Image (cartoon, rainbow, N blue to C red):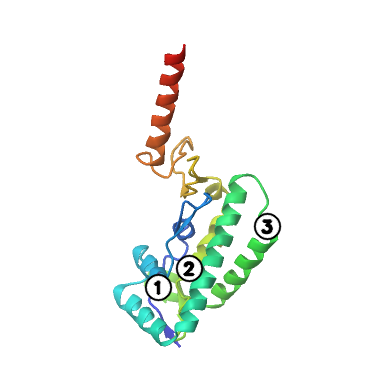
Amino acid sequence: MTTLAINSDVTQLSLCLDFSNTMLWHASDQPEEKLNHYSDLVAWAQDVNLLGTEQAQQLNKLAQQFSAQAANTLKAAIEIREAIYGILVATINGCSPTASDLATFNVALSHALAQSQLRSTTEGFAWSWQVDDVALDAMLWPVARSAANLLTTQEILARVGQCADDRGCGYLFLDVSKNRSRRWCDINDCGNRAKQRRYYQRQRLADSA
């Protein structure tokens, strides 16, 4: 057994939101998948600082040796992502999540927690992950724990929102505004489009008056 150097900040509540957003236009009829290869999953883990360059290279090398396992890991990652996304969207809309989404997530969470352990540090204790040499799914463990922490932290969960773009952007975000007024993935993207659309609608009404 070896310790993979996954970022120890496994309680980061927004991590699961970042992972949910690896599907673009998630709420539309034509979503765009960003995780098409196992290397995409590793690249995402690097982007959110779960993995360093050395660890990413290690996993990509292992994926070449164990291609079938890497393919299964990618498939599982997408299933876990969709379960987390489904649970969060249902919660945002005041609905109960599906039994299927909860079951998928709980299996992933159980597996993740079985790999976690406490380690002593100079400042007290911290979480770490004990993995074997072919743990191609290691980056999914902190994602599962992040989602569990978010879902059980009501005051933060209440601030999770979904982009209101009518084309089905579907982006999930943590609304940190004081009055919880955020509606868009980006005010300069979907937000700006909505602003322009309202302007044109007002102009048409004015012209027809």
Closest to the camera, between mark 3 and mark 1, is 3
Q: Earlier in the sequence, mark 2 or mark 1?
A: 1
Residue 58 spot, x, y in % from top left? 35, 81
Q: Is 166 positioned to the left or the right of 55 in the image?
A: right
Residue 152 spot, x, y in % from top left? 59, 56
What is the quadrant of residue 195 in the picture?
top left
Task: Tell me, for residue 6, which label it has, or none.
Answer: 1
Q: Is 55 positioned to the left or the right of 110 in the image?
A: left
Secondary element under disc 1, as helix, strand or loop, is loop
Image quarter (top left, top right, bottom left or bottom right) of the N terminus? bottom left
Task: Tell me, for residue 98, which label it has, or none.
Answer: 3
Identity of the amino acid at label 2? Pro
Residue 50, visible in the rendered structure = no
Task: Tell me, for residue 142, which label it has, or none.
Answer: 2
Residue 63, visible in the rendered structure = yes
Q: CA distance from mark 3 to mark 2?
A: 23 Å
Q: Residue at x 62, y 50 (%)?
A: 90
**Does 184 appear above or below 1?**
above
